[in-house]
């Protein structure tokens, strides 16, 4: 007897259910094996996180996939599986610039998955302090935006606190204008962090020319204000909509597409090499002509790509600066180590901030 459409659909759904059951059983089996790996690492006093191993997993799965399953979704699914299994070996606390639903919170979830415990802080300074004092295992901080440039409060905190960079996340930023009603006519003030306000400056000028802007310490705080006041609109993340029960007025109000923010993961120790790494340094040069050029020449002669350089004034010392540099490579690589040894002897101040897998 030929099955009708409903019967065929029921059979296909039964097959899907059977596959889902198999996937769940395999996930439980993978979790058990990950816990066994965690015990072996404890016995061998080895690091819980092996960046090279994780990169190899993604590369193998991508090759096996042959572009059949959407690649971005495949990576997202396995990222959540891998981080959940890793966190089964050791639960971690992650501090971030709060409150809930900031872009920093979103970056933390993207990096550590949903299984970590997240702790909101009132300032970037507080994120560093929590990690340095051991109250959190890791912290997430924004360090630069592709449009507005460096986040100076993060750079300044590296000069105050002893932490190491463990990783980086690059997140495409899409700004949502939200309020209680979803009606733009109800908005009398637009609140957000300084950077989103700057990134949406032209849109606000064209569409809400008479509305004053209110800078606050985070997009999450702006969303909280909008949730408590019907006349406040907030520029916030997509996560804020559900978290604070807000309505979308307009999505994607950033002035430039491709707006990306780079976040750093800070902790106590940098991970082992992944094969695609970045090394961050904090340097001070001697007060003599050509001193900075000498530093750059050492890097160039070593054949190392200088990915970033940024200067910051030293507090309390007029016209004296420290330089933040990002080099491509890991400090355990011989040519990078040799370069850093040369810089250490050449510079008046040298600090290795960490070597970590590059998000690129």
Image (cartoon, rainbow, N blue to C red):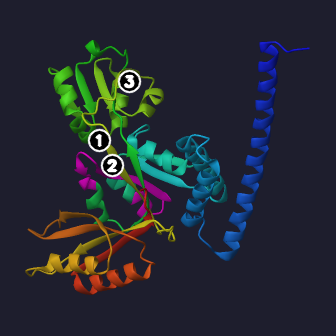
Q: Identify the disc placed on residue 353.
A: none
Q: Which mark is residue 227?
A: 3
**x, y percentage for residue 74?**
59, 44
Task: Find numbered disc 1 in the image and state the secondary structure of the residue it sits on.
Answer: loop
Instruction: State the residue position of label 1.
Output: 217
Query: Foreground residue, 223 or 23?
Result: 23
Residue 274, x across and y down, in percent: 51, 67
Q: Earlier in the sequence, mark 2 or mark 1?
A: 2
Residue under label 2, please give it: 123
Q: Earlier in the sequence, mark 3 or mark 1?
A: 1
Q: Which residues are magenta?
A: 129-153
As drawn, 192 above or below 147:
above
Reply yes or no: does residue 4 show up in magenta.
Answer: no
**Spot occupied by residue 50 in the image (x, y as percentages of width and height):** 58, 66
Task: Specify few, some or many for label 2: CA neighbours under 10 Å numbering under 14, 14-19, or 20 or more.
Answer: some
Residue 117 screen position, x and y as percent: 55, 48
Query: CB atoms at circles 2 and 1 under 8 Å apart?
Result: yes
Q: Does 114 sit left or right of 8 as displayed? A: left
Residue 131 lies within the magenta run: yes
Left or right: residue 85 versus residue 174 is right
Name the one closer to the observer, 162 or 257. Answer: 257
The residue sitting at 52% across, 43% down in the picture is 72
| Crowding at mark 1 (Cα within 10 Å: few <14, some 14-19, many 20+) | some
Residue 182, image quadrant: top left
- As drawn, is 31 to the left or to the right of 159? right
């Amino acid at each position: 007897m030929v099955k009708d459409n409903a019967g065929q659909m029921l059979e296909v759904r039964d097959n899907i259910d059977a596959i889902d059951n198999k996937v769940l059983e395999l996930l439980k089996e993978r979790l058990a094996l990950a816990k066994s790996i965690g015990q072996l690492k404890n016995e061998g006093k080895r690091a819980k996180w092996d960046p090279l191993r994780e990169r190899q997993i993604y590369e193998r799965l991508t090759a096996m996939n042959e572009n059949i399953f959407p690649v971005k979704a495949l990576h997202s699914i396995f990222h959540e599986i891998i981080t959940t299994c890793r966190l089964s070996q050791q639960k971690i606390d992650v501090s971030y610039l709060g409150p809930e639903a900031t872009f920093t919170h979103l970056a933390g979830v993207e990096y550590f998955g949903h299984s970590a415990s997240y702790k909101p802080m009132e300032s970037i300074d507080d994120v560093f302090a929590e990690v340095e004092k051991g109250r959190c295992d890791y912290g997430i901080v924004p360090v630069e935006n592709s449009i507005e440039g460096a986040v100076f409060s993060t750079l300044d905190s590296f000069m105050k606190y002893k932490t190491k960079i463990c990783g980086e996340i690059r997140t495409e930023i899409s700004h949502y204008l939200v309020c209680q009603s979803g009606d733009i006519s109800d908005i009398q003030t637009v609140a957000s962090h300084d950077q989103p306000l700057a990134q949406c400056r032209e849109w606000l000028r064209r569409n809400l020319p008479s509305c004053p802007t209110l800078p606050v310490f985070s997009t999450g705080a702006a969303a909280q204000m909008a949730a408590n006041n019907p006349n406040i609109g907030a520029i916030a993340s997509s996560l804020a909509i559900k978290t604070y029960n807000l309505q979308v007025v307009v999505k994607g109000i950033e002035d430039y597409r491709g707006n990306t923010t780079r976040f750093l993961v800070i902790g106590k120790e940098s991970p082992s090499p992944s094969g695609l790494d970045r090394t961050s340094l904090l340097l001070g040069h001697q007060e003599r002509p050509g001193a900075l050029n000498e530093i750059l020449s050492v890097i160039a002669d070593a054949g190392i790509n200088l990915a970033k350089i940024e200067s910051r004034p030293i507090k309390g010392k007029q016209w004296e600066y420290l330089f933040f540099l990002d080099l491509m490579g890991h400090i355990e690589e011989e040519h990078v180590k040799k370069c850093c040894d040369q810089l250490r002897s050449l510079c008046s101040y040298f600090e290795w901030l960490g070597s970590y897998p590059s998000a690129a």
